[in-house]
Image: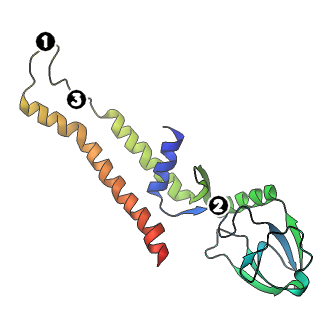
């Protein structure tokens, strides 16, 4: 099956897909942050008065109260920590290393990463395997569905009306079932991501 079809199918069958980068956008710099109080370290991005810090080497944090969004997108919601700038040491993390760290973190927590037209998405590995199995079964059933006989035989003899009706149902019942299931799953995705998310 074509990769794009598989991706769409997996996303339909697994509505709980997450953004790879989580709450911290891809273009926002992240840092290794060391807390002077207990010498603990985290990776995260920094907000000052609700605005993301975009400077990769800020020198003015000592006088600021900062909010640290810890870069663990597999945690929902992502942890926050408030601190005075003078009480932390920060070291810029290059984007390539961030991506590698996030990939390892997602995989360790039991998720599968897939590429979509909207960017990387992350799905629970068990849900991903179940969705792939459902798609494979659907493809197998579709493949073995018998083609309908011609309504007119090569000898130009008409096939009876009763046979036409039975052949129609035999071929199209699977299409009807797949369509109903697809509409139901699409409605569920819309409800979970848009309607429920707005509440």
Q: In this view, does 77 lie above or below 21?
A: below
Number of the label disc, if any, that sits on residue 19: none
Q: In which quarter of the image is residue 80?
A: bottom right
Secondary structure beneath label 2: loop
Question: How far apart are the two marked residues, 3 and 1, measured between alpha carbons?
Answer: 17 Å
Residue 28 percent coordinates (x, y): 75, 66
Closer to us: 175 or 195: 195
Residue 20, label in figure: 2
Q: Earlier in the sequence, mark 3 or mark 1?
A: 3
Q: How crowded is mark 3: few (under 14 residues within 10 Å), some or many (20 or more)?
A: some
User: Percent position (x, y) of residue 60?
Assistant: 90, 79
Q: Which residue is nearer to you in this view: 141 or 56?
A: 56
Q: Residue at x 19, y 23 (%)?
A: 150
In the figure, residue 119 lies in which quadrant? Answer: bottom right
- The residue beneath circle 1 is 155
Q: Position of residue 100 (x, y in %)?
A: 76, 56
**Of labels 3 and 2, the one closer to you:** 2
- As helix, strand or loop, the secondary structure at mark 3 comes to loop
Query: Can you identify the residue that label 3 sits on?
Result: 148
Asked whether residue 37 appears in the rendered view, the answer is no
């Amino acid at each position: 099956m074509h990769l794009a079809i598989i991706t769409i199918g997996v996303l339909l069958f697994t509505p709980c897909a997450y953004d790879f980068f989580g709450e911290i956008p891809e273009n926002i710099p992240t840092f290794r942050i060391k807390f002077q109080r207990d010498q603990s370290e985290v990776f995260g991005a920094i907000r000052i008065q609700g605005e993301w810090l975009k400077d990769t080497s800020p020198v003015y944090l000592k006088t600021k109260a900062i909010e640290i969004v810890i870069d663990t997108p597999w945690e929902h919601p992502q942890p926050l920590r408030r601190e005075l700038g003078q009480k932390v040491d920060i070291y810029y993390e290059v984007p390539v290393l961030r991506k590698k760290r996030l990939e390892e973190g997602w995989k360790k927590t039991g998720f599968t990463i897939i590429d979509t037209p909207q960017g990387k998405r992350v799905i629970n590995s068990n849900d991903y395997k179940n969705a792939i199995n459902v798609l494979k079964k659907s493809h197998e059933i579709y493949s073995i569905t018998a083609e309908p006989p011609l309504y007119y035989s090569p000898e130009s003899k008409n096939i009876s009306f009763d046979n036409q009706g039975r052949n129609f149902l035999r071929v199209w019942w699977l299409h009807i079932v797949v369509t109903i299931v697809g509409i139901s799953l699409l409605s569920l995705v819309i409800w979970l991501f848009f309607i429920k998310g707005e509440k």
